[in-house]
Image (cartoon, grey):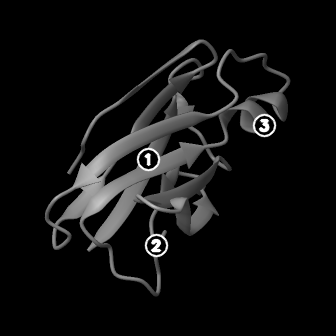
Amino acid sequence: MSVTTHVLDTSAGRPAAGVRVALEALDREAGWRRLGDGATGDDGRLSGLIPDARLLAGTHRLVFETGSWFAARGVQTFYPEVSVVFEVSDPTQHFHVPLLLSPFGYSTYRGS
């Protein structure tokens, strides 16, 4: 049905606005195929990654451009990007994949 995300900058204790995010699906023959992309809003949230497409069962990933986001703030980071790979078995469900981010670590989970 849909994939959403929410990025929080845990080092600053606030939402991470302006993080570029891409949603991709794995095609076993052709590799990763981009389904959509966007940037987090002022509240750190991003929805509507696949506005005109239906999510299909299979392996997907969210790619967060963390290096350029931290660089724009003058902060050194160890992770130039964060890729979160997840499996969709029931495409009728909603998939919320938050990212808790700091310059030298990150965590993610399946939200609701």
Q: Residue furthest front?
A: 29
Q: Nearer the viewer, mark 1 or mark 3?
A: 3
Q: Identify the mark nearer the N-term, 1 or 3.
A: 1
Q: Is residue 102 above or below residue 19?
A: above
Q: Which residue is mark 1?
A: 6
Residue found at x 79% / y 20%: 75
Along the viewing direction, whichever of 9 and 104 lies nearer the viewer? 104
Tell me the kind of residue under disc 2: Gly
Location of residue 25 by image quarter = bottom left
Locate the N terminus and report the quarter of the image it occupies: bottom left
Location of residue 53 by image quarter = bottom left
Residue found at x 26% / y 50%: 87
- 10 Å crowding of disc 3: few (<14), some (14-19), many (20+): some
Residue 40 visible in rendering: no
Q: Residue furthest bottom?
A: 52
Tell me the kind of residue under disc 3: Ser
Q: Identify the mark nearer the N-term, 2 or 1.
A: 1
SS category of the residue bearing label 1: strand
Q: Which residue is mark 3?
A: 68
Along the viewing direction, whichever of 18 and 92 lies nearer the viewer? 92
